[in-house]
Amino acid sequence: MNLTPKQKKILDFSLIALGVIVVALNIVTRCSAKDDCGEDIVEEAEYISINHLISNDMSDSETTRKLDRYVDNFLKRWEIKGGSLAIMKGGRLVYAKGYGWADEEDSLRTGPGHIFRVASLSKLITATAIMKMAEDSLLSLDDKVFGENGILNEEQFSHYRDKRVPKITVEHLLRHKGGFATYRGDPLFCTREIMIWEKLDTVPDMDRVIEFALSQRLGFTPGTSSKYSNVGYLILTKIIEKLSGMSYEEYCQKNILYPSGCYDMHLAKNLYEEKYPNEVRYYETHDAEPIPAYNNSGDTLYRRYGGNNIEGLLGAGGWVASPSEFVIFASHIDGDSTTTDILSQESIRKMVTCVGGELPIGWSRAAIGSEWKRTGTLAGTSAIIKRQKDGTIWMFITNTSSWKGSKFPRYIETMVRRASTGVEFPDQNLLEFIQ
């Protein structure tokens, strides 16, 4: 039987899908929180993540060779082990490819289904979850967070040092206007120091980190200025858990990620030995030096694996995902009619409307009728997602730090723009294989 190249590719994809279905790894089972998947299962459903169905050859074409060469050269020039790119146009996932090494020590090349720590791109997930809760009348963006009438009015959060703390609202946290300063460093990256300062025997959990932040003076009156704040998004994580009665991860998966068709996004772990089966290995610059472990154990570890408490970042920077699934998620909060949005048009407009120089909600830069983007960096990760004026959404991420630090996503953005100029992407929709 003679098949056209496109028919052959579809047949190959189908065979891959059949093989994947039997792999338990690809099945997400939803059950009641009561028994943690023991008895009294509420519902059971099978979901196949696109991560387990796509491969690099699906995006191979003569017209994208220039793009591939450009990316490969970029990784070599900046000494990046591996990266991954995904592009959506008109609601279609037209391109998804991995480059370089996912794990050089294991001789594993990067594919489009590998997941990475997405760093502060996590804030877009958290912000979307809060907007969803607002639409479901679980909270209002004007709600006060602390104090007698605040959402977090527990005794443990009532011993704040600064009398201006009760002025903080949910929207202040979303837009980095809560007033939090970093006089003693960012609390989310100072867990070892907090243990020493507070004479703690165990690593401070989310509640304890929030308590520590409240014990410090604010840098400005809430709502009067903006200062990027990881702890603000940690507090939003706590709000989601309290008002939903679910873990932060479970609420986000059930209410915004699964409805968007994203089934392989999770909260990250600290160590290489704890990584997910299809997660990449992380690398730092060649001159990176170990630091004291986050848990004050006395060990000296690299920031990417035990120097920083990645598990403690949660809604501020704790998610792992593939670019393929993340652009799918972003396409469901972009107001474009080519996909069904999980938020109302009003909520989406509010997220990207900025008045008086304030920051957008979730995004790092956005405006009505303009480009939207979100960047993120961690030891071992540099990431950027961008929605262009024409509606195209793309994401690129690496598994290696750059000496440029938080500025490196700018270089990625320039690279992707130049590499993709004039490129015709395959006439395909990789999403068809999970629908």
Image (cartoon, grey):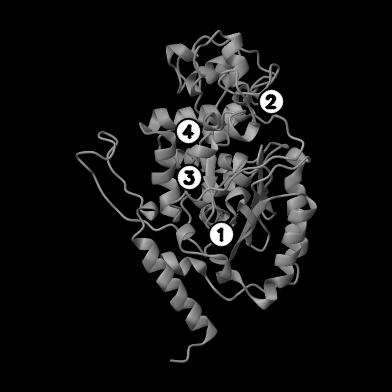
- Residue 6 placement, left or right of 387: left
Mark with earlier residue (2, 3): 2
The residue labelled by disc 3 is 276
Q: Is residue 88 visible?
A: no
The residue labelled by disc 2 is 224
The kind of residue tagged 3 is: Tyr
- Residue 42 placement, left or right of 66: left
For the residue pair 364 and 21, the one nearer the viewer reads as 21
- Residue 4 placement, left or right of 368: left
| Direction bottom: furthest residue | 1
Q: In percent of the image, x 48 and y 66: which residue is there?
A: 431
Q: Residues within 10 Å of mark 4 (few under 14, many from 20)?
A: some
The quarter of the displayed image where residue 391 is located: bottom right
Query: Residue 161: where, in percent of width, then height?
Result: 59, 9
Query: Is residue 49 positioned above or below 205 on the image?
Result: below
Mark with earlier residue (4, 2): 4
